[in-house]
Structure formats: structure tokens, C-alpha cells
Image (tube, rainbow, N blue to C red):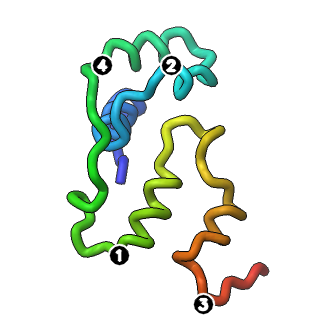
Amino acid sequence: MFPGENYLDQIQRIISILGTPNIEDISYIGNEQALTFIKSLPKRSKQNLKNLFPEAEEIGLDLLNKMLIFNPNNRLTVEECLAHPFFEGNIIRSS
């Protein structure tokens, strides 16, 4: 989804979909150059994933929206993802 030519291009692609992160969303970034770069980018609005994936079911889009959060501290954990209704009725086995 975010292949990027390099890390700068990748962050631009992420922001083009997720929208411009707010101050709280970038507060975990300790690299001043990275912060300056992100703040220098044009303001972007979050894209509606239904427009990007028109064939996707709403439940799948809900999960994707909860996973695609800029700040990793605010994303679902693996356990929370697996407990999402998207996976109800599917058998998931650990090895």
C-alpha cells in the first residue's frame, strides 16, 4: 500500500492516505529532521478507504481504518486485530 521509492517518498505516500498527522500523532518521533520534514509537507486530509477499495466489505474497512493509524501507540495491537469482528468465524491457529 505504501511502497515508496525511499523513506521520504514513503512518508509522503502514508500521509497522502492517512492525512497530515497532528502534534499528538508525531509526539513519539525523536528525530528533529524527521519532524521538520513532516511539518514541511502540505496539509492533507485523510482519504476515505472506501474510495480506495470500493469492493471491500465495511467490516474489513473498519479493521483497516483501525490499523492504519499514524501514531503506533494508537494502533490496534495484534491481539486486538485478531479479536476484531472481521475474523469472527475464522479459525486462527498459532504455531
**Image depth: mark 1 or mark 4 in front:** 1
What is the spatial separation of the Cα atoms under label 4 and label 3, in whole angstroms?
43 Å
Label 2 SS:
helix
Between discs 1 and 4, the one toward the N terminus: 4
Q: Which residue is mark 4?
A: 41
Whether residues under marks 3 and 2 lie with C-beta atoms below 8 angstroms apart, the answer is: no
Q: Which mark is residue 57?
A: 1
**Percent position (x, y) of residue 25?**
53, 28
Judging by the rendered image, the residue that carries numbered circle 2 is 23
Residue 24, given in percent of the width and then of the height, sits at 56, 23
Between discs 3 and 1, the one toward the N terminus: 1
Residue linked to disc 3: 89
Alpha-carbon span between mark 1 and mark 2: 32 Å
- The numbered mark, 2 or 4, whose residue comes first in the sequence reads 2
The reply to whether discs 2 and 4 touch (Cβ–Cβ < 8 Å) is no
Instruction: Determine whether 54 is above or below 11 in the image.
Output: below
Q: Residue 69, how many percent across, how many down?
A: 50, 44
Q: Amino acid at mark 2?
A: Ile
